[in-house]
Amino acid sequence: MTLEIRDLHAGIDDKKILNGVSLSVGRAELVSLMGPNGSGKTSLAYIIAGHPRYKIYNGRILFEGEDITDLSPDERSLRGIFLAFQNPPEISGLRLLNFMLASYNKRLGHRSNLLFVHDAGFLQRTREYAGLVGLGQELLYREVNVGFSGGERKRAEFLQALLLKPKLVILDEPDSGLDADGLEMIGRLIRKLIDEGTSVLLITHYTRIYRYVEPSRIYVMHEGRIVAEGGLEIARAIDEGGYRKLVDMVVNND
């Protein structure tokens, strides 16, 4: 098992957000986490990645069988956890290519020397993957996300994931604001990650992405809890009645 969350209770600034979350993601498996706004999905993503503002009150996070609950974000990243942000931030003064090179060298255990490539094929692969994700190569030489459109930021996140080859990629609403062509592209890139052995936790509001990629399992979160788990029947129930009807049905059955 790549990722196991066990009875996780956590919060931020004395506000409890997660109330006993448990879920798992297997090796090279696509698992989806759905839920309405404010349900705790993004908070869970940040907590898995080790965001320092969040406090864990109880529960454990296991990564490939190792307890990483108390590890720093840097240590989690080096173990192979990659978080693709819903709104990737700008980093002024740092070119995207140099940023990726520093991360790549760090993963290999080398010093983060921005001017030295330890792998002669790095630049070639970067250009190939940029074409694959539909990112203009001129953007590689611009500051990270500065002046990038929303779509370009998402493509740059996928480019980094493909280059770094993490063991787990957490995608926080990669399908937001995309048209059908953009959704097809996201689905294609998710399938490539899975085919290359990467596990994926896909966080989304919408079921439309399932036209292009099918998760092994869907979890639904509400008020910091997992309230439903299943296959595409969960997606159909959300399409037919929305989250409120699904949650009410689960509560009444309990």
Image (cartoon, helix red, strand yellow):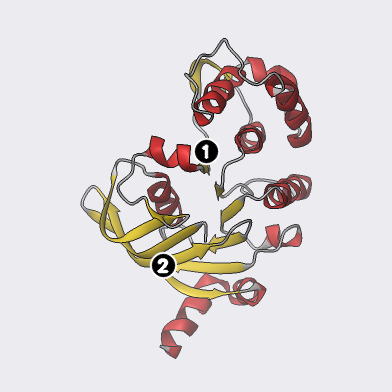
Residue 87 numbered tag: 1
Q: On the image, numbered disc 2 is attached to which residue?
A: 22
Judge the density around disc 1: few (<14), some (14-19), many (≥20) Cα neighbours within 10 Å. Answer: few
Mark 1 element type: loop
Residue that appears at 60% across and 72% down: 238
Residue that appears at 53% across and 43% down: 86
| Left/right of residue 11 with respect to residue 144 in the rendered view | left
Please identify, in this view, whether the residue under mark 1 or under mark 2 is nearer the observer. Answer: 2
| Left/right of residue 24 with respect to residue 164 in the rendered view | left
Q: Residue 60: x, y in percent?
A: 33, 59
Q: How many marks?
A: 2
| Left/right of residue 107 with respect to residue 139 in the rendered view | left
- Residue 145 visible in the current orientation: no
**Nearer to the camera, 33 or 245:** 33
User: Mark 1 near mark 2, Cβ–Cβ under 8 Å?
Assistant: no
Outermost residue on the left side: it is: 14
Q: Residue 177: x, y in percent?
A: 64, 46
- Residue 229 visible in the current orientation: yes
Q: Residue 138: x, y in percent?
A: 72, 17
State which quadrant residue 232 falls in: bottom right
Q: Amino acid at mark 2?
A: Ser
Q: Amino acid at mark 1?
A: Asn
Cα separation, mark 1 vs mark 2, equals 26 Å
Residue that appears at 40% across and 88% down: 254
